[in-house]
Amino acid sequence: MDNFLMKPKIDFAFKEIMNNDKARTGFLAAVLNLDPESIKSTCILNPYLRQAHADDKLGILDVRILMNDDTEIDTEIQLSELKVWADRSLFYTAKMYTDQIKPGQKYNVFKKCVSISILDFILFEEETQFYSCFHITEDTRRFKYTDKMEFHVIELPKLPPKIKEDSSRVELWAKFINAEKTEEFNMIAEKDPYIKSAYNQLQIISQDEQKRLEYEAREKAILDYNQSIYEAEQRGEQRGEQRGGQRGEQRMNQLYAHLVKDKRYDDIERSTSDPLFQKQLLSEYGL
């Protein structure tokens, strides 16, 4: 066997890691700031890829977990920048919440819904901390309107460069998810027994030929999707530049037509070498 290791932040690998009971318990305890011993049981709810639309080529591979107190948790990893992420996570958490009730049932059936977003881009530009937790609270007195919705956001690019002795559990997990080299995995795994279980699971799935093929297919799909978005943006910029160039050429042709009509031949010559004078002439003719 080779030394190949999957990247945990590729969502396929993360989901496979979460199939390990101990790793799943440790991750949830770290993010939710719970004692792992208080989590008696968890189970994965969704074994399949979720597609937002029928023609969605990439789909979303998220991890839906039900805890022993019926709290439902949705964990997603997003590698490419998506500035509307907050709206998107709110939509799916609200849907997760409303899906709990059936016609004729009372509102007391609702259980807590938690969103965990692991992002490989910066969502909150003005903030420096890599981890944020949100609740629905009153604006000035900060008491909760309800505890039935909770949002956790981990921004991987904001992680501190080095692990410290007092690094939090959630920071260790974020470091593990962001790691790519064996030395990094070994160092982090030694600091937390639950992460060690996650690392053991990562090593097992990385040497599974079928899972490796699935992982590589998923990684390729993500890379292809990101490349297609990048190329679409580039084409848009090129079209914008071309249209801008065409409009500029049209304005100059109109200007020269006016100058020829007014027999301002010296101004034509000067405008070709003096951008400020050229701008003045364009303004003079309202172009």
Image (cartoon, rainbow, N blue to C red):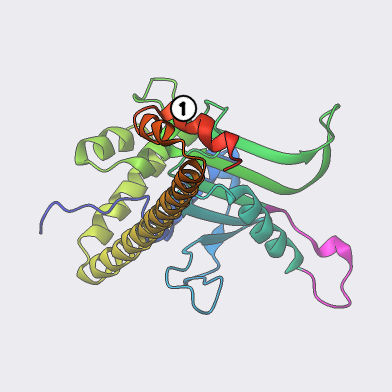
Q: Is 151 on the left-hand or right-hand side of 31?
A: right
Q: Is residue 112 magenta?
A: yes
Most prominent secondary structure in the magenta stretch? loop
Residue depicted at 52% across the width and 70% down the height: 50
Residue bounds of the magenta highlight? 101-113
Q: Nearer the viewer, residue 175 or 22?
A: 175
Q: Position of residue 205 (x, y in %)?
A: 27, 61
Q: Position of residue 171 (x, y in %)?
A: 45, 32
Residue depicted at 26% across the width and 43% down the height: 180
What's under tag 1, amino acid-wise? Phe
Q: Position of residue 104 (x, y in %)?
A: 89, 77
Residue 43 visible, this orientation: yes
Q: Is 211 on the left-hand or right-hand side of 46?
A: left
Q: Nearer the viewer, residue 118 or 233?
A: 233
Q: Which residue is mark 1?
A: 277
Q: Please state, as top left, top right, bottom left or bottom right, where the C terminus lies in the image.
A: top right
Q: Please state, as top left, top right, bottom left or bottom right, where the N terminus lies in the image.
A: bottom left
Residue with the most extreme left position:
1
Q: Position of residue 215 (x, y in %)?
A: 29, 64
Residue with the most extreme front position:
263
Above or below: residue 44 compared with residue 69? below
Q: Give the SS element for disc 1.
A: helix
